[in-house]
Image: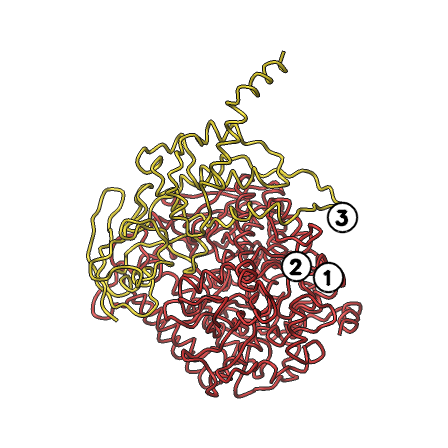
Chain colours: A red, B yellow
Amino acid sequence: MSEYQTNEYDVVVVGAGGAGLRAAIEASADGVSVGLVCKSLLGKAHTVMAEGGIAAALATTDDRDDWKVHFTDTLRGGQYLNHWRMAELHAKEAPACVRELEGWGALFDRTKDGRILQRNFGGHRYPRLAHVGDRTGLEMIRTLQDHGVHQGIAVHMECTVVHLLRDAGRVVGAFGYDRNTGRFRVFRAKAVVLATGGIGRAYKITSNSWEYTGDGHSLAYHAGAELMDMEFVQFHPTGMVWPPGVRGILVTESVRGEGGVLRNSLGERFMFKDIPELYQKQTAATEEEGWRYTQGDRDARRPPELLTRDHVARCIVRETKEGRGTPHGGVWLDIAWIKEKLSNAAEHIQRKLPSMYHQFKQLADIDITKQPMEVGPTTHYVMGGVRVDPDTQMSTVPGLFAAGECAAGLHGANRLGGNSLSDLLVFGKRAGHFAATFAKEHALGAGGDDGIAEAARASLRPFDESGPNAENPYAIQADLQDMMQANVGIVRIAGEMERALDGLAKLRARAARTHVRGHREYNPGWHTALDLEHLLTVSEAVARAAIQRRESRGAHFRDDHPAKGDAYAKVNFIVRKGKDGAMEVSSAPVPEMPAEHKQIVKEMA
Amino acid sequence: MPKATFQIWRGDARGGGFQEYSTETSEGMVVLDAVHQIQAEHAPDLAVRWNCKAGKCGSCSAEINGVPRLMCMTRMNQLPVDKPITVEPMRAFPALRDLVSDVSWNFEVKKRIKAFKPRPPDAPDGTWRIQQADIDRVQEFRKCIECYLCQDVCHVLREHLLHEKFVGPRFLVHIAALEMHPLDTEDRVEEMAQAGGVGYCNITKCCTNVCPESIKITDNAIIPLKERAVDRLYDPIAKLLRVLRAK
């Protein structure tokens, strides 16, 4: 395939957010050649948006914390559908990963004795999030970027992968295009790491940028790998709801960690009305106790605003549905009230939540030190992803690895805030290491040429389309987002999801007729058309898995099955491409924990 | 809400010009929303770079009515809508297509700056102790989102095209963050003065004025770096001492 520019690497990493950068750095440190391919410019990936912090049991702020508590918190948050081994590795290795970042120049906020300061977050028993104000993601990605550019990694920016090359049952490279030139590129590799992030663009209201079209999920699926837990999509409880242009932009959980409270239009702290059984013992009995918790009182229990994200999001939906919402269909998030408690409240808020202060001031004319914010749920994260080996992060297809949001297993039915950044570090590092190991044990594969020719043909088709049936890719994307939001959103019901499947089939037929204008150089209409394949694939995976799980658990809530179902308590749903090309869903038992881990869970309860 | 008219630069490295579009505005709309609306309705191939849409990634830098700004943080109600709003790419960099400019030079410059090199951990637990007061300034610099608006507005780059001799405000902030980092042991003063060209900055503060993160680029980063360069390279007494010591 000499007609396309071809690069050869031992390891190709697709995606340059936290997981991709960390994987590339590790593989490079292991002495193999690394190509890092990313859709945007380096340092712009969605990791930059992470605000609250990195969860790691450093125990600098509360010495009662250790990996066992973090492990147990993660499992409880994930409703025990997590892979125990990933939860264990994550809890054990996160502290070293955070300290490693410090050694690469990251500057976290400090405790009085000069150590890394940790903050409270939903579902974490102790203050556990290493942070920098509310711009932790920026600190993390910039640190990795600035370290990474000195490690001899070849970076291919603004380059999008549309197809994985396969040869004799293994993945041997990737095929994509340069945004700037529109020219096709071939990357030959002994191992490929997917670190492409999430699927938020499948929904209308989302905190995710244009990039998050489920590329890694879809690439892996079409390469024959299995996806898992796709029914679990996290709707973050607090996104901006007004004005319309900013709808969905994230309002960090740190607002609640710092003492912010949720109220309905009647002024009630409605979160006190519904505290799940699993968290009864850990939740504050009074508003006063909740406040003391946010201020570091070790004897106080956390306020119900800091319950897990799935629960808080559903409570907000209930308040608005029952007519106790704000004028624009959200609820109030109030941090300004802490002026009753702190004399320097305004200054304190600006120091602890600088990005939020500016975001509301600039985009909504709201001064959060004086007024409450209007917030509602926004599509934020997908727990589901490529099914991987917990230690090596290799998918069910040899040579193909996945890490970060596009991999499944760590978070189970619901991710705790702060566990994403640590996930990226721990499993990015592991994926990089094991991909490098795989690369050392294998030669470059030669095949995949048929796939290249077909992918090139399919990619160029939208330029040839014409006639009255030609479709606008932006319109199809918007219709898909509307439909997923309405039918496979926070509250789900079988009939609606079945309708979504019909709707997806129709959208797929339309997507085969997209037409794009202009030429191939930096043409966003064309890029939108090519991203549709991924969006359709992941949307179908979410809908099919969600139909199968006839219960409510974690982020997945079924109005027609509102309770947890015993039959589903120890089951993960697996999505794969069947022999006939149709999507298949099957169930697999959640891997059984060893006795000593069960003992830890028991002790911590 | 009224309709707004835009003059959007369309073209590439070979040249281009403004094209007029009009679109409905809505409450709270930002310029990036309007550009996306125009893209979906009239110009599907209109090239624009963006990601977070919340002022955190620094991708959607452009010149709006001639002023370097982030499109996602520029509210329509801050602009006069009675006349056309002009939107064009950053002009200090080569045009790629439409609103997208080629910022690759910035990535090359950063690679040339010596990496962070910490002193060995010296706390008993194998880490470091750092006081918050000692990092407030560096944390200010590390707020930088690399939007390159400061590079775009800087006349040393924009008008005098001294890209080969001057790294620009962004990378002086980067160097300052490294130099003032309490753990760093590397010395970049000489390279900053020579290859970095800190002397070219004549402190007009244009960069500070356009910084979306309100980093006091000139006062807090560039002036202290200039002082370090002067102390090291041009202080006559220090120079004499060096000569004497060398003997």
Subunit bearing disc 1? A
Where is residue A362, by image quadrant? bottom left
- Note whether residue A168 is visible: no
Tag on residue A197? none
- Give the residue drawn at x 40%, y 66%: A365
**B105 on left or right of A263:** left
Which structural element holds mark 3?
loop
User: Crowdedness of circle 2 by 10 Å Cα count: few (<14), some, many (20+)?
Assistant: many
Which residue is tagged 2? A118
Of residues A143 and A455, the one drawn nearer to the viewer in this rendering:
A143
Amino acid on which disc 2 is placed: Gln
State the residue lying farthest toward the top: B247
* Residue A547 locus on image (x, y percent): 51, 81
Give the quadrant of the C terminus of chain A: bottom right
Tell me, yes or no, whether dots 2 and 1 are on the same chain. yes
Which structural element holds mark 2?
strand
* Residue B193 locus on image (x, y percent): 48, 29
Query: Which marked residue is nearer to the observer: mark 3 or mark 2?
Result: 2
Which residue is tagged 3? B125
Subunit bearing disc 3? B
Are the residues flagged by discs 3 and 2 in contact, CB closer than 8 Å? Answer: no
Where is residue B155, by image quadrant? top left
Tag on residue A62? 1
User: Crowdedness of circle 1 by 10 Å Cα count: few (<14), some, many (20+)?
Assistant: some
Are the residues flagged by discs 2 and 1 in contact, CB closer than 8 Å? Answer: yes
Amino acid on which disc 1 is placed: Asp
